[in-house]
Amino acid sequence: MTSGGDAPGMNAAIRAVVRTALYNNCEAFGIYGGYQGLIEGEIRQLGRYDVSNIIQRGGTILKSARSVEFKTVEGRARAAQQLAEHQIDALVVIGGDGSFTGAKYLIQEHDIPVVGVPGTIDNDLYGTDSTIGYDTAVNTAVEAVDKIKDTASAHNRLFFVEVMGRDAGFIALRTAIATGAEAVLVPEIETDLTDLEHFLEREYNPKNSSGIVIVAEGEKSGGAYTIAEKVAQKHPDYDIRVSVLGHIQRGGSPSQFDRVLASQLGAAAVDALMDDQKSIMLGIMNKEIVHVPFNKTIKHTKNLNPELVPLVRILSV
């Protein structure tokens, strides 16, 4: 099943899980609507043709949903009962840390083997270099910012562009470097508006230049609109615009990187279950598949690459 926010490449992972299971003479079932669908018994068997022609599609054919009921002991008991009634003896969850937290409780309370596949555009899961959907989301953001730069240049405007990243600045940081942005603001680093203003005063000339500042949506000062308003109050001569990219970063056809990664991790998830593994996430580190205990990936925080953080400022001089 897929759970939490959708990410490009989830369908490729679904395809890999189903076909690897069939290759190993196992039956595969799809749970529709995440944990809520599991509780309600929205389950049907999947064959190879059910997952044909989906590797290039964004979103998830199994749908996804939040489930308040699954957060209760009674809800998880109903979910376990549905698995038993359908004679399902192992589960692959494609999602993020919230999805894996739910899986951990299912294991603890009902001893159901569960393995996780990291599917989130935020790339914020500890234990894997990249999550499914992250590469596509960054490419989407970069393409959009490149177009914004064209109109910014035409009018000598300063754009504050907000990208997704409620709790993590991975998309923002990589997008900023790839687009040559003047500055980047992320949740992990407290924003010093004075520093930003001094930088703009030194490097940005509203009469003969344009500028791009990338802002992660979870930036602690309040996001792109709030920061743009504060800068505009002190610099009324700046022609400032704000663009929020929003959910376009979740959609679209997955990149080849995400398709291959999803295929690798989906197949590895089935292999892990066949090897009696449970309560682990399949990740990729240094191009190698790794097994990461749910406890580690849930409890630990993944940090931004310290070599990339100063690069935006260095290259903006």
Image: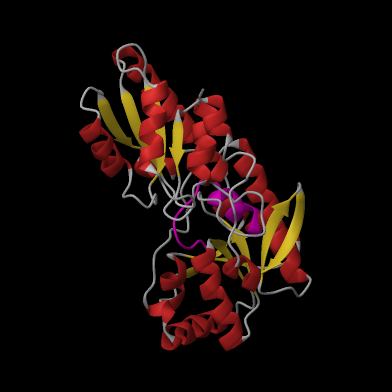
Question: Which of 260/145 is in front?
Answer: 145
Q: Is residue 281 left or right of residue 175?
A: right
Residue drawn at (31%, 50%) of the image: 222
Residue drawn at (38%, 27%) of the image: 200
Q: Is residue 8 left or right of residue 88?
A: left
| Magenta run includes residue 9 | yes
Residue 216 versus residue 21 in the image, above or below = above
Residue 247 x %, y %: 37, 44
| Quarter holding residue 149 | top left
Q: Is residue 177 left or right of residue 157?
A: right
| Magenta run includes residue 308 | no
Q: Can residue 146 be seen in this view?
A: yes
Residue drawn at (47%, 54%) of the image: 61
Residue 284 versus residue 236 in the image, above or below = below
Q: Can residue 56 be seen in this view?
A: no
Residue 17 x %, y %: 64, 58
Residue drawn at (45%, 56%) of the image: 167
Residue 228 versus residue 301 in the image, above or below = above
Question: Which of 271/100 is in front?
Answer: 100
| Quarter holding residue 235 | top left
Residue 265 x %, y %: 68, 55
Question: Which of 190/253 is in front?
Answer: 190
Residue 47 x %, y %: 60, 58
Magenta residues span 1-17
Q: Is residue 24 left or right of residue 281?
A: right
